Structure formats: structure tokens, C-alpha cells
Image (cartoon, rainbow, N blue to C red):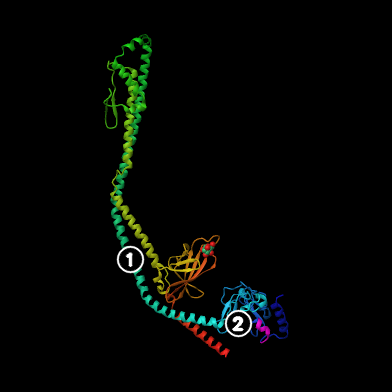
Amino acid sequence: MSIARVLVAFIALCASASTSFANTDASHVILRGFDPAQASALRDATTFTCDSNTRTIAITSVNDDYCDCDDGTDEPGTSACAGAGEAATTKGMYCVNRGSTPTRVPSSRVNDGVCDCCDGSDEYDAAQNGGVVCENTCTKAAKARRAELVNALSAARRGVKAKAKASRYAKDDRRAMETELKDLQKQMDEAQSALEVLRAPKEQEEALEREMREKERLLEEKRAEETKSTEEEEKEKEANTDGDARDDDGAREGARENDAMEDAAEETAEERGKRIAGQWISDESESTRVDDEDDDYDEHEDEDHVVVDDPMPADGTKTSKFSALFARAKRALQRARLAKKDADAGAALTSPAFPTTHRDAFDKQQRAVDALQTQIDQVRASVNRNYGPDDVLISLRQQCYEVKIEKYAYKACPFGEAHQDSVRLGTNTDGVEISPLTGDMMLKFTNGATCWNGPNRSLSLTLKCGDREALADVEEPSRCEYSATLFTPQACDESAVAELDAELSTLDRIIAGAGRDEL
Ligand code: MAN
């Protein structure tokens, strides 16, 4: 059992004799960590109510080092309720800090071996905190805080003036943005009209191009058909000629055998030449080498066809073998010519055979329209953004602020992106928000770079009164979730000045009171 529990058991024993613990030693323990208003309400109480009035416990259960209430309010003077309800400003231990400003510390810091309150009241149990004894630094702290307050107050007064000056430009800024948007829209109307003027000639051009391509296609089809029928015709002819040759060969076979020697001997030089030429052109792969001039064939062209007249041997007798060879050569030649025409037609299709003047002009204008649209979208987004009450932050819309804190360089552009070095902490898409807790203006940067095994990075930037813009106090309260302050005159107003003024007066009174106590 802890010392506090033993103590509380003792108090309970005493309490059984009397329901009030006022002015007893026990009251000191029970009231530890409560603020003066709560402490005075509890001074004569026998019970304690917590969890939004849904739970009531005996007063002896308060600060007994056991956490009874879910909201942690029954143990402001111990660490028993550490973690419970610490977000609320009324929770945790209240440090009186005589001679300085009172503060609150989370329950987890009570007796943790670190001095948090300037009066050392958070480290009251040396047995628990490893023997730490806190020096009272409240006078020193009060002086330091006073110096801070004096600076903040004069900065706030300058800020109020700077803000008044800037507010005159806020209206001009908005008007300038709206005028820019109007101008762009006017330019867009003109650009779109120009585009429409260019549309008809461009469409005519395209229709013509389609028509020409169609004609070209039909022509190709016709050529292919003609080639096919020529080939078929030639094949048929060849087949007939071969049949004749076979008949002739059959009829003359005997005679040829008998006359073979004689025929060979009788072949004239001219016949021999034709025979060799015939053998040469029988190789179809070589057939394109048939030359108009060097040959006996009489070749001429009509538009698409090569016409080669069937030659006769010099002696006037048409030999069937020669005819067959001749037919093959003629076909090969025909194919070579058509292949060349195909190649030429293909080149014509891929080369800029069609005029593109109107289409080019239209495309150029379309690109101008698209670029204008992008500009319009950007300016419209700027016009529609929330710059705070009375457009108070409008002058910051294209600004960025930087600060180096420990190993990182931070940069925040209030209405753009925020970075930690080159890592994106997020983008502010919603403009200014007002904190429901403090009434401060805030800028939220969300959807930043993914955190390893964690959320996307984000930054919550609070605007505070200062005499000039300055990014400060960047912290990472939770991994990859950052917070920072942007000091700016735009967050200054008379109420901020009055608040600082009041705090300074209070502190001055405290310091003066402490001085009197010391006398
Ligand atoms: C980097 C920084 C830190 C962050 C870690 C998370 O080191 O962005 O701020 O906490 O990544 O892994």
C-alpha cells in the first residue's frame, strides 16, 4: 500500500468522527492539485462528483493514489489517473507558483523526477521521485515571463497598426483577383470565338483528306484485283501452252529422237542466243533485270500495266517452250512494275500529301484556349478561397515562410504546400479555419507524404499575433502529425493587446505581492 493510501486510510478514520476535513492535515492532501476555485468548493465537502456528474465518491477517495473517475479528476495531486482526460485544460495538477503565473501539468508528470512547476509542487514526494528536490524558480520565471509579455505587447500593438494598413489593401487584392478573372474570361470568350471561326475550314480540310484517302484505298483495291486477274490469265495461258507443248512433244518424239543430233548441228547462232536468253529469264527472281533495250521483247506500258509483245523466234516458228518461258518473264516483269507502284503509293500516304494549314491553325488555337482555362481555374480557386474574416490573410496568399529547427528546414506557404526539407507535409485546400477551442485562425495542411507504417503527414498551423510574419515552434506531437505557429500582424487585434496587457498587470501584481510577502 502506498504512503498516500495509508494516509488516506488514516484520514477516513478521522472522517468517521467528523464529516468535515477543513483545516486538517488531510485537507492539504485532498486539496492538492486543485485550482483555487475548485479547492474552495471542496473545502467542506464530504463527497466528490465526477464523470459529468454521473459518479459520486467519498471525499476520502480524492487524491488517495487510486483513480476512481474515468475523467481522472479525482487525482489531480497524484499520478494515479495519468493519461485520463488530460486534453482538457481543467485537468492535471494545478501549480500555484506563488510569485509567478499559475500553470497546470499533466498527472503523468507528478512525482516523475522532473521539476515542471516553478514552485516545485509537482515533485512533493522525494520517496517516489528518486529524491529530487525542486528549487523554487518562480521569481526568475516571473521576470522572464514579464520580459516576454512586454515584448509581445509591443509587438501586438505594432501588429495592430500593420494589420490596419494591410486591411486597406485586402479589398484591393480581392478586386485585383476578381478583375483578373474577368479579364481572363473575356480573353477566353474571344479565344473561343476565334476557335469557332477556324473550325469549319479545318473540318472541310479533314473531309477532303478522308475523301482522298478513300480514293487512294479504292485505287489500291483495284490495282490488287487487276494484278490478281492478270496472274490468273497468265497461269491459264501457260497451262494451255504447256498442254500444246506436250502434244507436240508426243507427236514429234520419235522424229526428235531421230533428228536430235541433226537439230543440234543445225542450230544457228541466233537461235542459240535466243535459247540462252530464254533460259536466263526463266529464273523468276532475276526476271526484273529484263531490259527494254537489250532484249528482243517489245515492251511498253499503259497506265498500270506492262505490255510485252510475244516475240517470235527469228526463223518465224513459234516454239511452245519459248512461249512458256516468255510468259513467265512477262509475269515477273509485271510484278516488279506493280511492286514499284505500291512502294510509291505507300510513300505518298505516309508523306504529308494533304494540306494541314487549317488544322494546324485550329490546333494552335485550341492549345491557347486550354492554357487560358488552366489559368482561369487557378485564379477562380484563389478568388473562392477562405482568407479568414474580412479577407484578413489575403495578402499572404502567394507567400511562403521558412524556419530551421534542429536538423530540418521547414517551409509553409499558407495557401499552398508545407514541407519538411523536401518531404511534403501537406496542402492547404480549405483556407482558414477557426479553432473552436481557442478562437485562433488555423491553416490545415493535409494529405502529405506517407509516413512509414503511419498516416500521411499533416501540419496544423496556428496563427498568432506578431509584428511580422515568422514561422516558429514546429513540433511533432504525434508521429508525422506536425504543429507550428505562424506569427503575423494579421492575427493581432485589440483584444489580443488587451489580453496581454491584462496578463502583464496580473503578473506585476503577483510580483509585487510576492515582494511584500518576502518583507
Ligand atoms: C522522418 C521525419 C520525421 C518523421 C519520420 C517518420 O524522419 O519526417 O519527422 O517522424 O520520418 O518515419
Residue 132: x %, y % from top left = 63, 77
Mark 2 nearby-residue class (10 Å; few <14, some 14–19, many ≥20): few
Q: Secondary structure at mark 2?
A: helix
Does the beta carbon of the residue at mark 2 sit less than 8 Å from ligand 1? no
Query: Mark 1 or mark 2: which is in front?
Result: 2
Q: Is residue 483 magenta?
A: no
Please name the residue that numbered disc 2 is placed on. Answer: 38
Residue at image position (44%, 72%) is 470
Q: Identify the main secondary structure in magenta.
A: helix
Residue 69: x %, y % from top left = 64, 74
Q: Which range is magenta?
A: 23-29
Please name the residue that numbered disc 1 is placed on. Answer: 182
Residue 471 visible in this rendered orientation of the protein = yes
How many numbered tags mark residues here?
Answer: 2
**Quarter of image, res 350:** top left
Mark 1 nearby-residue class (10 Å; few <14, some 14–19, many ≥20): some
Quarter of the figure that contains the C terminus: bottom right
Residue at image position (36%, 62%) is 376
Q: Amino acid at mark 2?
A: Gln
**501 shown above or below 305:** below
Q: Which residue is at the front of the view, 103 or 230? A: 103
Quarter of the figure that contains the N terminus: bottom right
**325 shown above or below 378:** above
Residue 492: x %, y % from top left = 44, 77
Q: Amino acid at mark 1?
A: Lys
Residue 437: x %, y % from top left = 51, 74
**55 shown above or below 373:** below
**Quarter of image, res 518:** bottom right
Q: Which residue is at the front of the view, 212 or 459? A: 459
